[in-house]
Image (cartoon, rainbow, N blue to C red):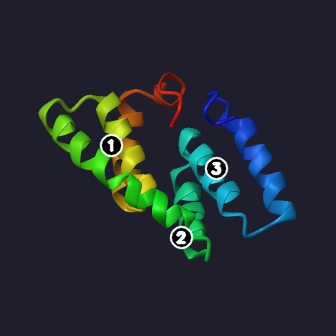
Amino acid sequence: MLILGQPDKAEEQSVKALTLEPANAEALWTLAASQMARKQLDRAEVTFASVSALPDKRFSIRARAFSVPLSYLKPVFEKEPTPRHEFHLAMLYLRSGDRVTGARLMEAALKQNPNLPRQEKGW
């Protein structure tokens, strides 16, 4: 649902899944991403921390997979710092596990363009 630009439905489904299985890393990850899309940065940070604390290491592998794209996008942002580039960079930081930098960049991008989560689908 989040990929389809429906963070409310994604959050609803994640909460249902977490009711059945509180340690479901994928549901927590989706919940955190939907909170980010809805600009609930404080809640998202807590949820991302919950994901990191789980023994499910699939998300550690996913975080390492984002390190290469991050190294490519960071220079693009530095050369042309648009809200769109900042949003993409923020998402990569968040997915790589750097919640502090990701949340800071996301907040700055959304201040400049609050429609980015709807415009940049697929994150």
Q: Earlier in the sequence, mark 3 or mark 1?
A: 3
**Type of the residue with mark 2:** Ser
Q: In this rendering, is residue 5 above or below 97?
A: above
Q: In the image, what residue type sits under mark 1? A: Leu
Q: Which label number is shown at residue 89?
A: 1
Which residue has dot 3 on it?
30
In this picture, is 98 found above or below 122?
below
Residue at image coords 71%, 37%? 8
Residue drawn at x 47%, y 27% is: 120
Q: Which mark is residue 52?
A: 2
| CB-based contact (under 8 Å), mark 3 and mark 2 | no
Residue furthest left as drawn: 79
122 vs 61, nearest the viewer: 61
Q: Position of residue 25 (x, y in %)?
A: 65, 63
Number of other residues with Cα within 10 Å of mark 2, as a class: few under 14, some 14 to 19, many 20 or more = some
Spatial CA distance of label 2 from label 1 is: 20 Å
